Amino acid sequence: MKVKIVNILEKDNEYYVKIKSDYGAICGVWKEGKPILNKDYYIEFSVEEPLELNKNLFINNNNNNNIHSIFMENDKIILNGQYDSLDEDGCLAIKLGKSIILLDYITNKENINITDCNLMLKLSSIQIFNTNLI
């Protein structure tokens, strides 16, 4: 996903960044070197907290224009996207516009059907990695 770094805060040898994309803006921890303010990057997300349905992963029945969006709400990172796939190892793929985000999903695939729906994630933190494509 293409983003621009719009704010950087250095604390305890970590860089906390605010990124802006075509889908919105969020804050996260930059994981590779020192980012450059106002520079465009292609990035990947990593989420350390396990995803659980109705805890931090929700079926989003809101069919408005925000199906593909990222934003901050009450210190939570909100990611809205569309289900793409879920493999037997619990790797959940979510479409966010033209990007695919891969996440670990801990609820057993046989226990719940989340296929063919819009999903909303409410996350405490997110790690951001530069893919070095720009």
Image (spheres, rainbow, N blue to C red):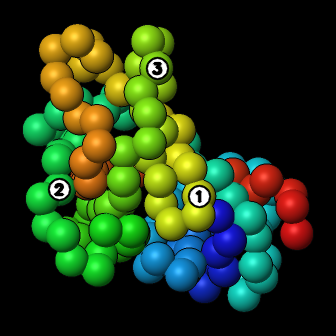
For the residues labelled 3 and 2, say whether their Cβ atoms are less than 8 Å apart: no
User: Which quadrant would the N terminus be assigned to in this image?
Assistant: bottom right
Q: State the residue in front, 118 or 89.
A: 118
Q: State the residue in front, 81 or 39.
A: 81
Q: What residue type is labelled 1?
A: Ser
For disc 2, the marked residue is 60
Q: In this view, does 127 lie above or below 50?
A: below
Give the secondary structure at mark 1.
strand
User: Which residue shows up at 36% across the image and 53% down it?
Assistant: 82
Q: State the residue in front, 9 or 24.
A: 24
First of labels 3, 2 by sequence position: 2
Q: What residue type is labelled 2?
A: Asn
The disc at residue 87 is 3
User: Which quadrant would the C terminus be assigned to in this image?
Assistant: bottom right
Give the secondary structure at mark 2.
loop
First of labels 1, 3 by sequence position: 3
Measured in 3D between alpha carbons, the distance from the residue under mark 1 to the one under mark 3, in whole angstroms, is 18 Å
Residue 12 shows up from this direction: no
80 vs 90, left or right, is left
User: Which residue shows up at 29% across the image and 43% down it?
Assistant: 116
Measured in 3D between alpha carbons, the distance from the residue under mark 1 to the one under mark 2, in whole angstroms, is 19 Å
The disc at residue 31 is none
For disc 1, the marked residue is 99
Q: State the residue in front, 126 or 82.
A: 82
Q: Is residue 103 above or below residue 131?
A: above
